[in-house]
Image (tube, rainbow, N blue to C red):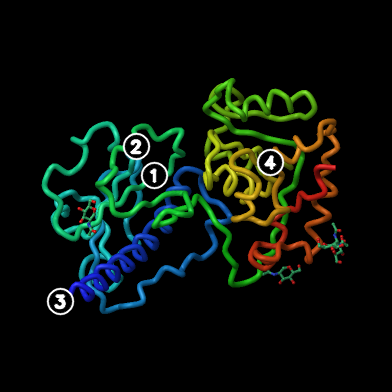
Amino acid sequence: MTPTQQQQSTSYNKCLLVFLLQAVFAFIFFTYIHINATSTQLEEVDSTPFQSKNKNERIVTILLWTWPFGNRFPLNRCKNPGESSGCYFTADRNDYLIADAVIFHHRDVCNSKSQLPQVQRPSGQYWVWFTLESPSHSPNLGFMDNLINITMSFRSDSDIFTPYGWLEKHIVEQNFTIPEKSKLAAWVVSNWNPYSKRVKFYEELKNHFQVDVYGRLHKSLPREDMQKVLSTYKFYFAFENSQHRDYITEKLWTNALSYGAVPVVLGPPRENYERFIPRDSFIHVDDFQLRKNLQITCWSWTKTTQDTNNTSNGDQNCGQNQTPNGLLITAKHASC
Ligand SMILES: *[C@@H]1O[C@H](CO)[C@@H](O)[C@H](O)[C@H]1NC(C)=O
Ligand SMILES: *[C@@H]1O[C@H](CO)[C@@H](O)[C@H](O)[C@H]1NC(C)=O
Ligand SMILES: *[C@@H]1O[C@H](CO)[C@@H](O)[C@H](O)[C@H]1NC(C)=O
Ligand SMILES: *[C@@H]1O[C@H](CO)[C@@H](O)[C@H](O)[C@H]1NC(C)=O
């Protein structure tokens, strides 16, 4: 092989690998959220854009070095070796020497180099650095500097982008009925830090606005009841634990959007959210700070639901048809 040919083949291999990892992780991700948050509407969307195109391609072996936070999930997106899915996904460390790529979940290995493979890396093997946690909750971030080849995270500029959720077009148009609403606003929070932006915002807001708080130090809400309870609220506070670019979690995708509540978001800036969901499908906490004397209580659910009937309300880039009818409850008039 000439150096150029070799380069081409390396970058081709890398493309294939990135493609397969994307497929596998898209699937795992659904599974992961499924385990964590029970079934959701968004998950039911058929996600089949991830099929190996080259059936005769050699099998790529991908090794998951640790189960993320010890959570196991089925590895059945890649079929068994010999079947023609193009990839073989395994969590058996005995496969290390034959693996084309090894995925390291940051938080499971970042304490010590002794948690990484102790045998020399086979040539051509890619190491993939994977995280779902924000930088604020990722200690020892430089731990794998100069060791990894591919990044995989919630950041859209990762080599492999693994967001917590996304919008997809339904193949058949769906009728979506907004769940019946009897309560105003809910927030589920387990990590209560009095100095965090989200708790400060809540402390200010609660003087004007009835917010039911669930979680470890508040009302209890068993996971299996989340959908039933949260869907009776008009608004859901999708407040992230820290503010970082693209760090938008299942709090938005599952707890708010798929349960049919208008998301009130606190996280990265509004423009960042608008890259992923239509601009009038959520309320950003910064929308309030624009108005000093805002009467928050003037939020009107009637107004917001009426707007969902307006089919020309869809975002240009993310047309109305891409979302279940009415799922994106428009909030643009809701902040008075
Ligand atoms: C992956 O990165 C390591 C460390 O920088 C490097 O030694 C190795 O050659 C890279 N592997 C591939 C397949 O590019
Ligand atoms: C949606 O509702 C309309 C009116 O009730 C009905 O005609 C149509 O068949 C329904 N579509 C689906 C996909 O259920
Ligand atoms: C939505 O539009 C339909 C058809 O124009 C109308 O019959 C219905 O009353 C509207 N619903 C609301 C909540 O405005
Ligand atoms: C529907 O939404 C479009 C776009 O936002 C707006 O121009 C139009 O006036 C709305 N129609 C009604 C009846 O609210």
Q: Is residue 78 above or below residue 39?
A: below
User: Could you tell me how far apart the alpha carbons at marks 4 and 2 are, in whole angstroms?
Assistant: 29 Å
Amino acid at pointer 2 = Arg
Mark 2 secondary-structure assignment: helix
Which callout, 1 or 4, points at the residue further toward the start of the chain?
Answer: 1
Q: Are marks 4 and 2 in contact (CB under 8 Å)?
A: no
Amino acid at pointer 4 = Val
Residue at x-position 78% and y-position 29%: 209
Residue 61 position, x and y percent, is 23, 61
Q: Which mark is residue 264?
A: 4
**In front of the other: label 3 or label 2?**
3
**In front of the other: label 1 or label 3?**
3
- Name the residue that disc number 2 marks: 107
Q: Are marks 1 and 3 in contact (CB under 8 Å)?
A: no
Which callout, 3 or 2, points at the residue further toward the start of the chain?
Answer: 3
Mark 1 secondary-structure assignment: strand
Residue 81 position, x and y percent, is 21, 66
User: Could you tell me how far apart the alpha carbons at marks 2 and 1 are, in whole angstroms?
Assistant: 7 Å
Mark 4 secondary-structure assignment: strand
- Quadrant that contains the C terminus: top right
- Is residue 115 found left or right of 242 in the rendered image? left
Instruction: Characterize the local packing of mark 2: few (<14), some (14-19) or many (20 or more) Cα atoms within 10 angstroms.
Output: some
Nearer the observer, 184 or 3? 3
